[in-house]
Image: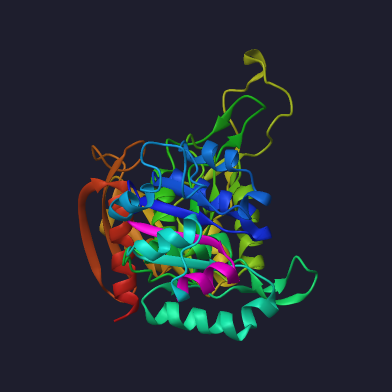
Amino acid sequence: MLKNKNILICVTGSIAAYKSCEVVRLLRKEDVNVQVMMTPSAQKFVGKASFAALTNNEVITDIFPDSPKAGLEHIEMALELDAIVIVPATANILCKAASGVADDIISTNLSVCEQPTLFVPAMNFRMWQNPATMDAVEKLRERGRIVMDPEMGKLASLHEGEGRLPAIDTIMNSIRSLFKHELPLLGKKVLVSAGPTREAIDPVRYISNRSSGKMGYALAEVARDLGAKVTIVSGPVSLPPIPEVEMVMVENAIEMLSALENSLDEQDADYLIMAAAVADFQPANPSGEKLKRSNIVASLELVSAPDILKTINSQTEASIIAFALETQNGTAEAKRKMADKGADFIVLNYANEAGAGFESNTNRVQIFSKSGAEKELKKDRKDRIAKRIFDFILLDKNR
């Protein structure tokens, strides 16, 4: 959604300026082309070298730089940008922008540019409540500019009140909203399990499966893009962490169960997506030392691994989305599992189908709801399948 967008980040003089580095870093991870502009006061808090390194672009700080195009960069930029984000936005820049003042590099650009513009305030609570600031915010909103509300909390002045920079994930969702992207999961919490588990035989051998974790990670990323606060509990995978998603890495089924229970204890999830391929069995007596071939008996004693979903489904009021990987009698088996495990939805795919299931970038699935609705999704990339799974779930819940 944000890929290849051209976004101008304007940094003004607030102690929260250092948090702009994280916003820039996350945008770059989503392949956004970021240009940073700073006021002189912002440079008192964060050096421009930090933003230059993060963006791989020169930071604009002077309205009249020593260049052949001196003073014209802001005019050209007005034609090229997709959006402007002022983070942090001080009372000073809010009042300037509302009054049309253009006496520094940022206020001058704001007076020229007509792109979607987001102000992310951070200041002392008395500044935010100052009548001049309140009037400026009202004017900007009337003109179609988006001005976020700061958060309540401890301020740099050691006072407590409304003035803290909003949370980073809230800022990122507001940036997405600039592009008219719907956020149906805004304010919702999504907990995802993904990947395989490894059940140790000894320190070097284990029982596992071929799950890559790609489907679970795709669902987590789509949930994030739809506005949700996402936590993923992942078994061992060769996938990079997902920006803006809380990552909890585990090794075996017992650790995964514990991590999911801890997440449910810490926050009430709205959606629980069980996409992990958890081992059905684990060695009864794993060895603490590497077993020698001559000492390994002909048979390996196994016990059942915990049925994670059956264990935790009574611990949450979340909508539960389970997965069923089958090789035959898929529809009947998926519906049986949905009822047996108390799931609201179940996603069926086939391990013996080319381009679906494990170790593939694509998938073909059928989705079943306990309401009786069902839908088949033709083979497609897993990120697109993930988006259509959410489309089905949200439509079913709104019926």
Where residue 174 sits, quadrant-wise, is bottom left
The x, y position of residue 315, in whole percent, is 60, 70
Where residue 116 sits, quadrant-wise, is bottom left
> Is 135 rendered above or below residue 356?
below
The x, y position of residue 137, in whole percent, is 50, 79
User: Is residue 89 part of the magenta span, yes or no?
Assistant: yes
* Rendered residue at 61%/44% (across/down): 250
* Rendered residue at 23%/37% (across/down): 354
Which of 70 and 278 lies nearest the eye of the viewer?
A: 70
What is the magenta range? 82-98
Q: Residue furthest right?
A: 158
The x, y position of residue 42, in whole percent, is 62, 54
The x, y position of residue 345, in whole percent, is 37, 66
Which of 304 and 150 lies nearest the eye of the viewer?
A: 150
Instruction: Check the picture and name the quadrant holding the N terminus.
Output: bottom left
Which of 4 and 286 lies nearest the eye of the viewer?
A: 4
User: Is residue 25 part of the magenta span, yes or no?
Assistant: no
Give the side of residue 239 with respect to residue 150, left or right.
left
Give the side of residue 82 with respect to residue 231, left or right.
left
Give the side of residue 60 with respect to residue 251, left or right.
left
Residue 45 visible at all: no
* Rendered residue at 47%/69% (across/down): 101
